[in-house]
Structures are given as structure tokens and as C-alpha cells.
Amino acid sequence: MSNEKQYPMTLAGKEKLEKELEYLKTEKRKEVVERIKVARGFGDLSENSEYDSAKEEQAFVEGRISAIENMLRNAVIIEESEEDADIVTLGKAVTFIELPDGEEEEYVIVGSAEADPFEGKISNDSPIAKALLGHKVGDVVKLTTPGGEMEVKIVAIRSSND
């Protein structure tokens, strides 16, 4: 059995990674190779910032390709079941209110490979998600955040596909 890290993700998250991988391999790689060729034409490589920049970008692109391939190879698709429909689990959207009178917030709990806080997708490894997992609507949960502790009340749980 492999000891490689598994990457839980939704089917949509896996498809997004597959599209990014395809783009990096078919388009971005070619763009970077072309930039390197052009930069080589500027002469002395020891003082050629365009060449250095293109080589750095190439290293980043190749590293990202490798990382995505690893995530996809070790992906575990999150399956939703009817039994846990009202429980906070991976792949669910959770709406909660900060107590006593805070604003309503909603996050989708996803695997680390597809986390994007700007899109409201938080990693199951994050402190907020760890605290919410396993709870139900109506539960009051104590969250530890970088800004300190706070209590929230879960007001809704739904499939992230809804």
C-alpha cells in the first residue's frame, strides 16, 4: 500500500485540476519555451533577465504540472450519501452565524487540493472546517481562528452541488 498523501476532492474540483493540467501541458509549456528561445537571442545569458525570468517560469510550470499529476493520481472523490445529508461533511456547503449577532457566512468544505478561500471553499484541514465537521444544523460550535475564538451557530447544510 502506498504511503502517498491522498487528496479528497469533489468531482468538480478534479475536473478543474484536469483542465488546468491540460492547459499547462498544451499551451503554457509552449509559451515558456518560446520565451526562452527569444531571450536566448538577446545574447549573453549571464546578464539576461528575460532568460532568467523565463527559466524561473518554466520551473514553476513544471513544478505545478508535477503537483497536479500527483494530486490527480492520489485523488479520492468525495461521495455524498443520504445518511449524512444533515451532517457537515467534506463537500458540503455550511452556513453559520457568528454569535451573538454576527453576519451569516457560507463555506464549502473541500480537500486541500481545491481550497480557494476567495471562492468560499475552505480546506478540510483548516481550523474552521475541522471544528464544523460532524456537526448538524442548530449546533453551536466554538471555532479557533487566527483572530481568536468565536462561537457560531450552524443554520444550514446543503450539498455543494445544489
Image (cartoon, rainbow, N blue to C red):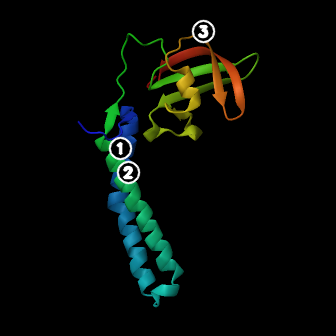
Label 1 packing within 10 angstroms: few (<14), some (14-19), many (20+): many
Q: Quadrant of the N terminus?
A: top left
- Horizontal side, residue 87 vs residue 6: left or right: right
Circles 1 and 2: CB atoms closer than 8 Å: yes
Compared to residue 28, the image places residue 105 above or below, namely above
Q: Give the SS element for disc 2.
A: helix
Q: Which mark is residue 71?
A: 1
- Name the residue that disc number 3 marks: 138
Rendered residue at 53%/33% (across/down):
122
- Horizontal side, residue 67 vs residue 97: left or right: left
- Name the residue that disc number 2 marks: 67
Who comes first in sequence, dot 2 or dot 3? 2
Rendered residue at 36%/62% (across/down):
27
**Hey, what amino acid is under mark 1?**
Met
- Rounded to the nearest angstrom, the CA distance separating label 1 from label 2 is 6 Å
**Hey, what amino acid is under mark 3?**
Gly
